[in-house]
Amino acid sequence: MAISKDKKATLVAGLTDLLSNAQMVVFAEYHGLTVKDLELLRKLARESDVKIKIIKNRLVQVAMKNTSTFKNAETSPLTGQLLYAIGSDKDFASAKVLAKFAKTHATLKLMGGFNATGESLSQDEVNTLGALPTKNELIAQIIDTLLSSVNSIVSGLEQQTKVTA
């Protein structure tokens, strides 16, 4: 079924608005995912403040040309049956959501993305960003490391007081 010109214009306007606030856009091939799988992916994405869009690649290219950030982005990789994860935070949430989902659903293949400055990201770069811990996870790791040293010192002092007592 063909989409009317008005509907296309509405889709492009909505996507342009999303892209203008995007910190990262990740695209992936979703061929072979069921509707139930896509619903689960959308649920996971909503929890991370990521928007999942399945829209014609040509309309995405038009919307990208309408934004200052992605105006000059290389759009040649946008071919095939793609879905787009658009994140507006700085924690690489869009890459993380898709990478996490791809671990349990082999038919989802991360293909690439665009960062906040409009530069293209390769498949390997997106996979790497998806594997990075979040800011809160890093803070927790640092606190754990610092506390383990303190706990070791306290434990050693307690043992020393028991020996001398």
Image: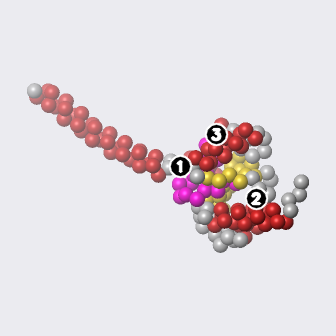
Q: Which mark is residue 105?
A: none
Residue pushed farthest right?
1
Residue that label 3 marks: 103
Q: How is the image coloured?
A: secondary structure
Q: Which residues are magenta?
A: 84-102
Badge 1 density bin: few <14, some 14–19, many ≥20, Cα 10 Å: some
Name the image quarter holding residue 125: bottom right
Upstream in the sequence, badge 3 or badge 2? Answer: 2
Type of amino acid at the residue the image marks with label 1: Leu
Badge 3 density bin: few <14, some 14–19, many ≥20, Cα 10 Å: few
**Residue at position x 53%, y 49% in the image:** 132
Upstream in the sequence, badge 1 or badge 3? Answer: 3
Residue that label 1 marks: 132
Could you tell me residue 40's position as x and y percent? 67, 41
Upstream in the sequence, badge 1 or badge 2? Answer: 2
Name the image quarter holding residue 37: top right
Could you tell me residue 104's position as x and y percent? 65, 37
Name the image quarter holding residue 92: bottom right
Type of amino acid at the residue the image marks with label 3: Lys
> Is mark 1 in CB contact (under 8 Å) with mark 3?
no
Type of amino acid at the residue the image marks with label 2: Leu
Examine the structure image and report whether residue 80 is included in the region drawn in magenta: no
Residue that label 2 marks: 78
Quarter of the picture holding the N terminus: bottom right
